[in-house]
Image (cartoon, rainbow, N blue to C red):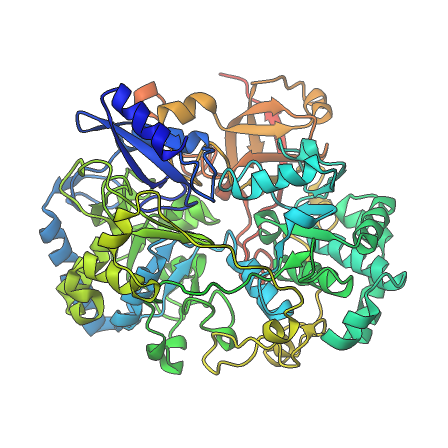
């Protein structure tokens, strides 16, 4: 629907039409950035339509986007600030005012800073959101580096890519003759148009599609070749493909000679990782490994689309490095149809971080760096690993974090080891939950701060390549609260950091960020469907510029010291890490722990994203829950038959670490030795009479099932968390 059509529709139905940005891919602010038309009648948000003018979604919209009004008016919405009056974990609160809550939080944080140091405060964050820079800015102003990233998506790829090929190389779908999507769901996850429509266009012009993943989602059904890799073994598969490519001389000799460092060392190193070795680990036949490696190397225009699934393993950094090396040595880097480096935009919003305050003293206070100290800060600022912050609460090592703010994240369903997480929240001195709706962690909060959805505020703005759009207010807030942005402005003001936070003026903050683009929010809002920027003509083979990029680390050293692709990584070697990609087994696997397989014969992993829900939110939305009412375990027909399990049976799934009760879906498109479930289940839906699930044993919170062994369960370089274990599955019999 275009704007003219939307206005006509609204007039016909006696409604108001407001162009804005969808906020359903992340609580508290726009996530995916899809353009929408919101319809309002008698002051009530009624429905949504996709905006044709948006280059992000081109008028398409997923189920979450259409369910936005139900999300806004959910019975789970937080409508008033709350202060704990009972014991932690009980969930007994009293209502207080917004200002009283801000003053109380400011008082506690100020006192803790005086007593224990600024680093005693941490902020837990989900994946990057529109408000992420505000979190970094607040912590830096306070004097703490402890921004806790959840370590479940994106940053692991960005880090390993930058230190291997200098930047994040994105697939050029529009010109590819061969596309490998690896641990990725280009149609089923993410904004509905940006990857999905490009993928479908490639398919329509007969590009060959290869899917590397343990199970078949809707988009894998469009693949010409399915490579059913065992969960957590992507690094072994990638190393074997390097073995084939280097062993059969399927490389771009001119590119390797001019733009790669350490080829001979790499070639010798990967000789040990032959396809037969990888078959025993990955479950992919050696013949198929050879076939796919040859197809990729010999197709002139070939791209790899790497997804979250590759990041959830102790070998995440090795897998990503190996795949980036594959792109490079086969000549598919920054060339038409391959993996290309983005063209820098002519102008971008102002960066509101405070990098001048990143000092060695600040960095050294990180309670548990997400990336090693030598690489801090990376991209946005210093980051701690989410789970390490919670570990410090329990262990006191290297020092105890005493206060945590959780804006738009739920620790108990966002990281591994649910029982440990709940113990940490119980022990924590001060816990502040900041969210739009009731969260799993709320019973442990000292203060609960409700915040507005993006439909209830007139900020922020959204910028994606080629398009700038204001988030326009659709309705007035349903309660006495503000946005997540304003929460941090108000808190900063109350503590005494107002000078760094526009003295609490959100309009001034937005205008300051927009200044490099030559406009302010008032002007942007007049552009009802946003500002379109002409596309920047692509320039390929930007090797000299990209390979000499400076990092964000304190010394501003280059990502690639030799100005070449780091096949052999001297930067990692200097920091005490392996200079060549290696293979590390998951804590429990068919190849590494055969002693467990009699009791636990199946591999369990999880899907991170869904078209129906945003991570661990929105299962309280009736429309979305009607689409997917229950937590469902995908199980192969053979595995189900052996266990006398039928479709929609409830089953008990047990691992060495926990157990859960879930429903089954007999799913032919999955490995026979693998079962999988969607991440993020905990929430009920009051409108449909559906109760919450237990967070630990018995509930479908898959994080309760995985190992948290610090020596085995986490990648040593990028602190990615394991998302694989061995399980038994038994039909549940009601007593």
Residue lying at 49% horizontally and 34% vertically, measured from the top left: 611
Displayed quadrant of residue 8: top left
Image quarter of the N terminus: top left
In the rendered image, the vertical position of residue 395 relative to residue 181, given as above or below: below
* Left or right position of 359 against 567: left
Residue 222 percent location from the top left of the image: 69, 33
> Going by the picture, which residue comes out furthest to the right?
248
Residue 225 percent location from the top left of the image: 77, 38
Residue 468 percent location from the top left of the image: 38, 52
In the rendered image, the vertical position of residue 57 relative to residue 663, given as above or below: below
Q: 598 and 696: which one is in front?
A: 696
Residue lying at 73% horizontally and 41% vertically, measured from the top left: 209
Residue 216 percent location from the top left of the image: 66, 33
Residue lying at 48% horizontally and 64% vertically, measured from the top left: 370
Q: 111 and 140: which one is in front?
A: 140
* Left or right position of 374 against 25: right
Q: 262 and 534: which one is in front?
A: 534
| Residue 518 in sight from this viewpoint | yes
* Left or right position of 424 against 520: right
| Residue 670 in sight from this viewpoint | no
Q: 524 and 487: which one is in front?
A: 524
In the rendered image, the vertical position of residue 12 relative to residue 432, given as above or below: above
Count the numbered circles shown: 0
């Amino acid at each position: 629907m275009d704007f003219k059509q939307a206005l006509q529709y609204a007039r016909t139905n006696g409604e108001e039409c407001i162009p804005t940005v969808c906020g359903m891919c992340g609580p508290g602010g726009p996530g995916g950035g899809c353009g929408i038309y919101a319809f309002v009648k008698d002051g009530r948000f009624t429905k949504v339509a996709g905006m044709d003018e948006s280059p992000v979604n081109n008028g398409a919209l997923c189920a979450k986007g259409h369910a936005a009004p139900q999300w806004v008016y959910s019975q789970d919405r937080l409508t008033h600030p709350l202060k704990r009056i009972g014991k932690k974990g009980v969930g007994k609160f009293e209502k207080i005012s917004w200002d009283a809550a801000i003053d109380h939080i400011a008082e506690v944080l100020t006192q803790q800073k005086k007593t224990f140091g600024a680093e005693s405060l941490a902020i837990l964050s989900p994946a990057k959101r529109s408000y992420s820079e505000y979190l970094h800015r607040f912590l830096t102003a306070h004097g703490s580096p402890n921004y806790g990233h959840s370590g479940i998506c994106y940053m692991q790829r960005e880090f390993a890519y930058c230190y291997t090929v200098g930047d994040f190389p994105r697939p050029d779908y529009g010109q590819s003759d061969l596309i490998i999507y690896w641990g990725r769901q280009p149609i089923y996850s993410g904004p509905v148009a940006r990857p999905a429509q490009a993928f479908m266009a490639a398919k329509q012009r007969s590009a060959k599609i290869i899917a590397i993943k343990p199970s078949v989602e809707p988009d894998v059904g469009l693949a010409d070749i399915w490579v059913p890799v065992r969960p957590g073994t992507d690094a072994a598969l990638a190393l074997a493909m390097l073995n084939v490519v280097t062993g059969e001389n399927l490389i771009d000799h001119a590119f390797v000679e001019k733009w790669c460092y350490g080829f001979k060392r790499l070639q010798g190193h990967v000789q040990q990782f032959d396809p037969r070795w990888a078959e025993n680990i990955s479950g992919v036949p050696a013949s198929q490994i050879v076939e796919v490696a040859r197809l990729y190397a010999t197709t002139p225009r070939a791209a790899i689309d790497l997804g979250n699934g590759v990041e959830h393993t102790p070998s995440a950094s090795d897998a990503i490095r190996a795949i980036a090396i594959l792109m490079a040595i086969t000549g598919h880097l920054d060339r038409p149809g391959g993996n290309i480096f983005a063209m820098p935009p002519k102008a971008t919003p102002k960066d509101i971080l405070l990098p001048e305050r990143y000092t060695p003293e600040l960095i050294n206070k990180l309670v548990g760096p997400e990336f090693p100290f030598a690489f801090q800060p990376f991209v946005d600022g210093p980051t701690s690993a989410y789970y390490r912050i919670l570990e410090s609460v329990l262990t006191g090592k290297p020092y105890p974090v005493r206060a945590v703010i959780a804006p738009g994240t739920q620790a108990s369903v966002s990281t591994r080891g649910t029982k440990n997480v709940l113990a940490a929240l119980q022990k924590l001195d001060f816990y502040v939950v900041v969210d739009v709706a009731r969260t799993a962690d709320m019973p442990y909060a000292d203060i609960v701060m409700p915040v507005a959805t993006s439909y209830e505020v007139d900020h922020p703005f959204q910028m994606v390549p080629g398009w700038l759009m204001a988030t326009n207010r659709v309705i007035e807030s349903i309660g006495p609260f503000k946005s997540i942005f304003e929460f941090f402005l108000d808190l900063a003001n109350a503590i005494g950091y107002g000078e760094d936070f526009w003295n609490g003026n959100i309009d001034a903050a937005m205008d300051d960020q927009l200044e490099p683009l030559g406009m302010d929010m008032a002007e942007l809002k007049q552009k009802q469907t946003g500002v379109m920027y002409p596309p920047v003509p692509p320039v390929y083979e930007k090797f000299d510029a990209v390979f000499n990029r400076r990092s964000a680390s304190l010394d501003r050293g280059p990502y690639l010291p030799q100005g070449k692709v780091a096949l052999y990584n001297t930067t990692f070697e200097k920091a005490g890490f392996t200079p060549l990609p290696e293979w590390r087994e998951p804590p429990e696997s068919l190849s590494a722990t055969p002693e467990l397989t009699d009791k636990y014969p199946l591999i369990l992993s999880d899907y991170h994203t869904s078209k129906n829900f945003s991570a661990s939110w929105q299962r309280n939305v009736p429309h979305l829950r009607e689409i997917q009412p229950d937590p469902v375990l995908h199980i192969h027909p053979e595995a189900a038959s052996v266990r006398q399990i039928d479709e929609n049976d409830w089953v008990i799934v047990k691992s060495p670490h926990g157990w859960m009760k879930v429903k089954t879906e007999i799913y032919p498109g999955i490995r026979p030795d693998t079962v999988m479930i969607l991440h993020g289940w905990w929430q009920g839906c009051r409108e449909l009479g559906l109760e919450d699930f237990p967070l630990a044993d018995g509930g479908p919170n898959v994080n309760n099932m995985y190992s948290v062994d610090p020596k085995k369960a986490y990648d040593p370089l990028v602190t990615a968390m394991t998302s694989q274990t061995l399980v038994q599955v038994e039909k549940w019999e009601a007593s």
